[in-house]
Image: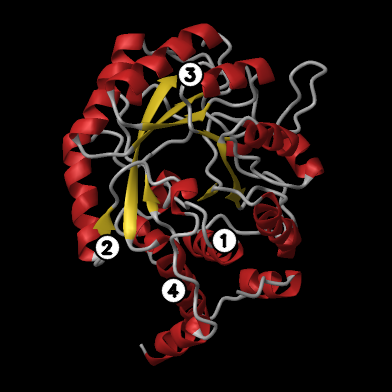
Amino acid sequence: MPRLTHEEILLWLRETEPTALEQLFARADAVRHAFVGDAVHLRGLIEISSYCVRQCHYCGLRMARSIPRYRMAREEILACARTAVRLGFGTVVLQAGEDYGIEAAWLADVLRAIKEETPLAITLSLGERMPHELRLWREAGADRYLLRFETSDPALYAAIHPRRGAAVSDRIALLGELRSMGYEIGGGVMVGIPGQTYEMLAHDIELFEQLDLDMIGIGPFLAHPDTPLGVPGVPTAGAEQVPSSEWMTLKAVALARLACPEANLPSTTALATINSVDGREHGLQSGANVFMPILTPAPYRQMYQIYPGRTCNEEDAIRCNACLRGRIGRLGRTVGEGPGGRSARRGEADPLPCDAGHAADAAAVKR
């Protein structure tokens, strides 16, 4: 399949004609079908801590906020993993703020326990940790690591992510280290960061391909109102400012699928938050193949407010699971079985016929 040029990516990002965009979404959906199939994999999200040492200008967990915090206990995490098995999930995602109160050895023990008790794959999303900690967790059973770099533009990244002491963040380099340790690696970006231009977002999508990411998380920029970027009047990039909208996010998802046909792409919680009616479905119809239902126990959910209004924040896991399975079925898709990692699929997918993209385009025009 021919790769997208920089000019093509920019043209699609700037495209606003609904009929043309339907062609893009249909083409991405055809690539998704050919390379990863019709299964939608469910990854149970366990938000194990709301502590964070960072001061990111948009996140509700930033250290400067005086809010109730929590860390889940070992048995609470294991109980969530057991729930994931009962609900038929293949993966759990352990996510937190960048919390150094989560000791490496303690978490390694939790990971070993999950692996001993369940068949689950484990994804970690714990921010920037030391290489020896990451290696320990990999040896203890972690399969994947999700480290979203949010933007590939160094100046924009620095503008919204204050440095922690003298340390300089280099998430791109850290992703390379994670791959060398044997992790499947995931990155991703926010769409519509104040100051983000179409050129920047195009470079983000090209970087997905250059890094050959196994997982790509893309969501609209949503700032907590009690943060520096959550107040009115934040400077933007003028006419070149990328909007933080559902349509723009769907364009980025579709282009990410075309750039990285084999990757796992979630239809994110943030996308569903800005369109709680059918945002999830739109994501799946634009190239995504993963849902991430929240398994965090109810007492903690309200304390994990990275942005307000998160969809399904009040639902229990059983009701949420039934709802998501119904949504998947109504799209004619199936619920994936097993871990659903990219490495397990390599060599199994049928190649995309050379005219599949054109056929999808033609079908979209006829609708």
**Residue at 42%, 36% in the rendered image:** 308
Mark 4: few/some/many CA within 10 Å (<14, 14-19, 20+): many
Give the labeled residue for mark 3.
Answer: 140
Q: Pointer 3: residues within 10 angstroms few (<14), some, or many (20+)?
A: some
**Separation (CA) of disc 2 from disc 4:** 13 Å
Q: Position of residue 209 (x, y in %)?
A: 66, 57
Q: Is residue 9 above or below residue 174?
A: below
Q: Amino acid at mark 2?
A: Arg
The residues tagged by marks 2 and 3 sit, at their Cα atoms, a distance apart of: 34 Å
Whole-angstrom CA distance, mark 1 to mark 3, is 34 Å
The colour scheme applied to this rendered structure is: secondary structure
In the drawing, what numbered circle is on residue 333? Answer: 2
Q: Mark 3 vs mark 4: which is more N-terminal? A: 4
Q: Are marks 4 and 1 in contact (CB under 8 Å)?
A: no
Q: Which callout, 4 or 1, points at the residue further toward the start of the chain?
A: 4
Q: Which residue is mark 4?
A: 30
Which amino acid, mark 3?
A: Ala
Looking at the image, is 125 positioned above or below residue 270? above
Residue 273 coordinates in the image, percent (x, y): 39, 47
Judging by the rendered image, the residue that carries numbered circle 1 is 252
Q: Secondary structure at mark 1?
A: helix
Disc 1 crowd rating (10 Å Cα; few below 14, some 14-19, many 20+) is many
Q: Earlier in the sequence, mark 2 or mark 1?
A: 1
Q: Name the image quarter holding the N terminus.
A: bottom right
What element does badge 2 sit on?
Answer: loop
Which comes before the other along the chain, label 2 or label 3?
Answer: 3
Q: Secondary structure at mark 4?
A: helix
What amino acid does circle 4 point to?
Answer: Ala
| Pair 3/4: label in front | 3
| Residue 70 visible in the snapshot | yes
Q: Is residue 299 visible?
A: no
